[in-house]
Amino acid sequence: MSSLPRTINGILKLGPSRFMRQLNNIGDTKVGTLIGTDQFGNRYFENNDESYGRSRWVEFGKEDSFFSRAEMNATQVPAEWHGWLHRMLQEPPTKDETMVVPKWGVAYTENLTGSPKAYKTYNTTRPKLQAWEPKAAPRA
């Protein structure tokens, strides 16, 4: 829960629309410095005035509308940004040369389970049980 001064500061610096979106999506309002953006449009922020563990956060690129909470998913954060968010890396991927994906690397994709693009296996075996279809004789 935000304090009154923090709430007023959030409304003034973020604007009413972004303030309400943050309140709906992450349950809190945060103001910080934009550190970078990834290939999915996710924006990463840092504010060292926050308590440890709350000073780095992500605003997902898919949060187009006020009620889009279901579209946000932790698998939408690439590994290099995950490491920075969880303080495994001090420097963000925009400054760290070791986090550049090599040309032979595979492009990152989010987990598509439950979506129309999810992988579906193809079964080549016949079912062991067949559905019973009753044969009804016509009544006379």
Image: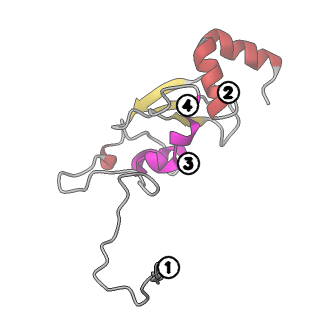
In the rendered view, tell whether residue 8 sits above or below residue 65.
Answer: above
Residue 50: which quarter of the image?
top right
The residue nearer to you, when weighing 36 against 66, is 66
Q: Are marks 1 and 3 in contact (CB under 8 Å)?
A: no
The residue nearer to you, when weighing 95 against 106, is 106
The residue carrying pointer 4 sits among few (fewer than 14), some (14 to 19) or many (20 or more) residues within 10 Å by Cα, namely: some
Residue at 30%, 73% in the rendered image: 122
Residue at 60%, 11% in the rendered image: 15
Residue 24: which quarter of the image?
top right
Q: Are marks 4 and 1 in contact (CB under 8 Å)?
A: no
The magenta region covers: 67-85
Residue 119: percent from the left, percent from the top? Answer: 35, 62
The residue nearer to you, when weighing 11 against 66, is 66
The residue carrying pointer 2 sits among few (fewer than 14), some (14 to 19) or many (20 or more) residues within 10 Å by Cα, namely: some
Quarter of the N terminus within the rendering: top right
Q: CA distance from mark 1 to mark 2?
A: 71 Å
Of labels 4 and 1, earlier in sequence is 4
**Mark 1, residue position:** 140
